[in-house]
Amino acid sequence: MRYCSNCGTASEEGANFCANCGSSLQRNQEEVNSKDFYSPKENDDYSSTSNQQPISGGIKALLYISTVFITLIGIIVGIIYMSDPMEEKRKFGKGLLIFGIVWTIVAFILPIIAFVFFALPYGMHYMYF
């Protein structure tokens, strides 16, 4: 026997609407089912990966800080997270990968270029021809 969630009246087993108030009993049954079991929604980011959790802010900060010291960490972890099914992890992975590449350029390539253009020409007058 079904009971109406709107007025509490008992209804017949095959009825789709409450005989007392006219509200839909089908909707009431769907609400009961959704309370008993988890049913993923279309826009739910965790529907395909129900066992995965989003990345915490502490882990994100730790990965960015470790990328500053070892740039390869950011590049590798960024590539791994970009292939994750969760949208949040893909966005974080893309940001970390970009940060790792930019930091590599800033920390290693620019100083080498600066050395070649500024330090080597001043040392040329000490060379013997």
Image (tube, rainbow, N blue to C red):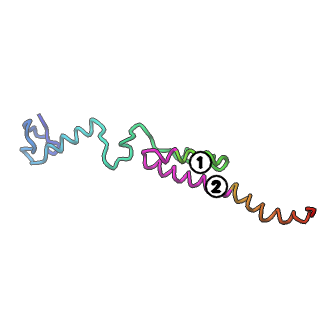
90 sits left or right of 2 in the view: right
Q: Position of residue 61 (x, y in %)?
A: 58, 48
Disc 1 marks a residue whose amino acid type is: Gly
Q: Position of residue 104 (x, y in %)?
A: 65, 54
Disc 2 marks a residue whose amino acid type is: Trp
**Residue segment shown in magenta:** 80-106
Q: Which residue, given by chain and number where applicable, does mark 2 sit on?
A: 103
Q: Could you tell me which secondary element the residue under label 1 belongs to?
A: helix
Write down the quadrant of residue 30 in the picture.
Answer: top left
Report how far apart the C-alphas of labels 2 and 1 lie in the structure: 9 Å
Number of the label disc, if any, that sits on residue 101 = none
Q: Earlier in the sequence, mark 2 or mark 1?
A: 1
Who is closer to the viewer here, 53 or 17?
Answer: 53
* Residue drawn where x is 86% and y is 65% of the image: 122
Look at the magenta stretch and give its main secondary structure. Answer: helix
Q: Against 41, is 102 above or below?
A: below
* Residue drawn where x is 6% and y is 44% of the image: 19
103 sits left or right of 20 in the view: right
Who is closer to the viewer here, 120 or 85?
Answer: 120
Q: Which residue, given by chain and number where applicable, does mark 1 sit on?
A: 74
